[in-house]
Amino acid sequence: MAIISAARLARTFQTKHGPVQAVRGIDLTIEAGEILGFLGPNGAGKTTTLRMLTTLLKPTGGAATIAGHDLATDPAGVRRASGYVAQSGGVDPHVTVREELVTQGRLYRLTKSQAIERALELADDLGLAELLDRKTAALSGGQRRRLDIAMALTHRPRVLFLDEPTTGLDPGSRADLWDLVRRLRDEHGTTVFLTTHYLDEADALSDRLVIVDAGVVVAEGTPSALKLRYGGSIDATLQDTFLAVTGRGPAPADTTPVAV
């Protein structure tokens, strides 16, 4: 069953030089419990699409639903069904992990006792239990990203949007975060919408990939299927495949988008 569905989703910005079509018609279908890697070169429309799907930016065309909630007519329902972790994060460096988590719970209208209980659950589940009384400013990059994700999971969303979640992390912290993403899918059935510039990350985590360029989908399928079609072999690297699909490398023999 599709938990995210978009049809001809579009966004045009008006500038002093005239209209700019950042997204020219995105079609997406994402199944419940799927980890989707959403890839594209700079300026392809990834961030604009993500901001539309998370209600941060209104589309100028098309339609989309998240967990059955219409993006245009029920944005509050979309937000209730979604968690969002921005690339820059959003923790307060002057408070403790416990205070940040409890405050987040209160913002989601939990009672104080419910917010405290949920904070302890999240801290235990995401490896933050020993850090509850530490100021967030003293956390490592990997610990801070786990806290960002914990805050996004406060209201038990069905869909988690992750925007470049491992940027700036060391290899060990990246590996820990990969394990966490897989566990969210495997143990909680969370659907994960992941944008990343790290193609090894997309290859390792994604059940399926969608590649966009110039505001439209240019390829989609499993990593193996895309490597075979565009890279010539399932042993091809995702980087070579990505470059071929987006025209930044040798042209593939068959440029017809494939869905597997």
Image: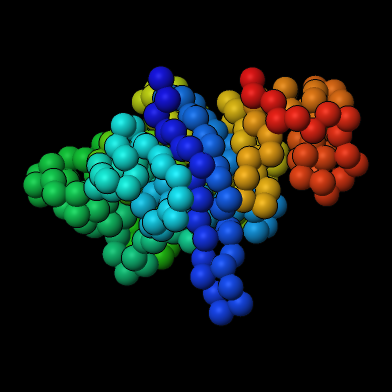
Number of marks in picture: 0
Q: Is residue 179 visible?
A: no
Q: Nearer the viewer, residue 20 or 158?
A: 20
Q: Nearer the viewer, residue 245 or 24?
A: 24
Q: Is residue 246 visible?
A: yes
What residue is drawn where x is 52% and y is 60%?
12
Q: Is residue 135 left or right of residue 47?
A: left
* Spot occupied by residue 49 in the image (x, y as percentages of width and height): 51, 50
* Spot occupied by residue 172 in the image (x, y as percentages of width and height): 61, 43
What residue is drawn where x is 17% and y is 40%?
117
* Spot occupied by residue 202 in the image (x, y as percentages of width and height): 64, 37
Q: Is residue 25 left or right of residue 243?
A: left
Q: Quadrant of residue 187?
A: top left
What residue is drawn where x is 41% and y is 58%?
57
Determine the residue located farthest toward the bottom in the rendered image.
16
Could you tell me which quadrant the N terminus lies in? top left
What residue is drawn where x is 52% and y is 35%?
28
Could you tell me which quadrant the C terminus lies in? top right
Q: Nearer the viewer, residue 5 or 133?
A: 5
Where 86 falls versus 119 (above or below)?
below
Q: Nearer the viewer, residue 232 or 128?
A: 232
Color style of the picture = rainbow
Where 48 falls versus 180 (above or below)?
below
* Spot occupied by residue 237 in the image (x, y as percentages of width and height): 80, 34
